[in-house]
Amino acid sequence: MRILIASTAFPECAQVLRGRLPDDEVVVEGADADGEFDVIVPLMRKVDAAMMDRHRPRLIQQYGVGLEGVDRGAAAERGIPVNNVPAADTGNADGVGEVAVLHLLALTRRYHASLDSLRARRLGQPTGTALTGARIVVLGLGAVGRAVAARLQGFGAELIGVGTRAGDEARDMSEQLGLTAYVPVSRLTQACDGALALIVCCVLNDDTRGLVGREVLDTLGPGGYVVNVARGAVLDYDALHAALRERRIAGAGLDVYWDEPVDPADPILALNVVATPHIGGVTTLAYRAMGDAVVANVERLRRGDPVVTAP
């Protein structure tokens, strides 16, 4: 079988698949991507109708969660099944949760300023902000949001969940995660009033694109932080840039961006931003588990069995 890794990002994906599928041809886009392929693995590449017609895949299988770059309508018209690997139970969500906490701690304990003090031989500076007793809002309580909330419980933070659940489901989620409150997305701005931080964990869709804009950021205020481990476009770029530049919020932690890979000269990175290159789910545990799921679906395709498809 021929498998096309459609992006040079996340290079370990190709290494894992080559190791697990030694008799198959695994090609990375830009190396030798001509002709037809049985499977396309999108990674961060857009897979549109033209690409499907050029390579005529029998399966589009993401190595991870995100399918926003895949034209699923075009795939359905061509009878091409599309699948992803949900973040739960693979270590992916756990890794993203760890990176969210990394960003939050780097911001609240003022890691950049600490390095300045270290270089200047200043002891006991800067003063950080404790998470103990602080209100932290978690936007989106899917697998990633739940992983973030579970980790923040250990810091003694007051957790506010924001999501789309209602009734008994919302109450069960609150009890399970030890939330102080669970509120609907329509009350996101109010939830951020008095919060130390907002951690963005929700999916990107038409409803969430630009959801975190000026009103939400202004409500966080000059002592508040925003951390995004979801997708870049959930945050309004212009609103975030202005809020950071004008110091209407204290800082931002970004593992995801509006265009990826992010331009290192992007002016937003020169402000009080802790930045990592979309490494949330990039752990040895997650890569192995996600690789298992990808290989299992490839083997179904090889045998002629029905493949697993994303909802």
Image: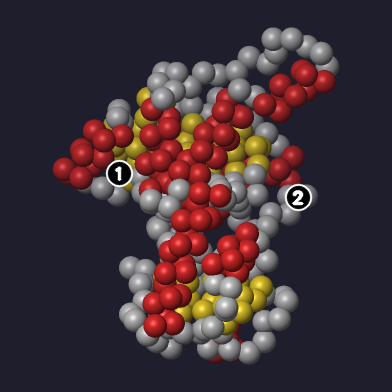
Left or right: 184, with 298 as reference point: left
Q: Where is residue 1 in the image (x, y as percent from the top left)?
A: 54, 83
Left or right: 274, with 38 as reference point: right
Local SS, label 1: strand
The residue singled out by tag 2 in the image is 264
The residue at 43%/32% (across/down) is 151
Local SS, label 2: loop
Q: How is the image coloured?
A: secondary structure
Name the N-terminal-most of marks 1 and 2: 1
The residue at 66%/37% (across/down) is 273
The image quadrant of residue 187 is top left
Left or right: 46, with 211 as reference point: right
Per the model, the C-alpha gap separating discs 1 and 2 is 36 Å
Q: Identify which amino acid the numbered label 2 is placed on.
A: Pro
The label on residue 184 is: 1
Q: Identify which amino acid the numbered label 1 is placed on.
A: Pro
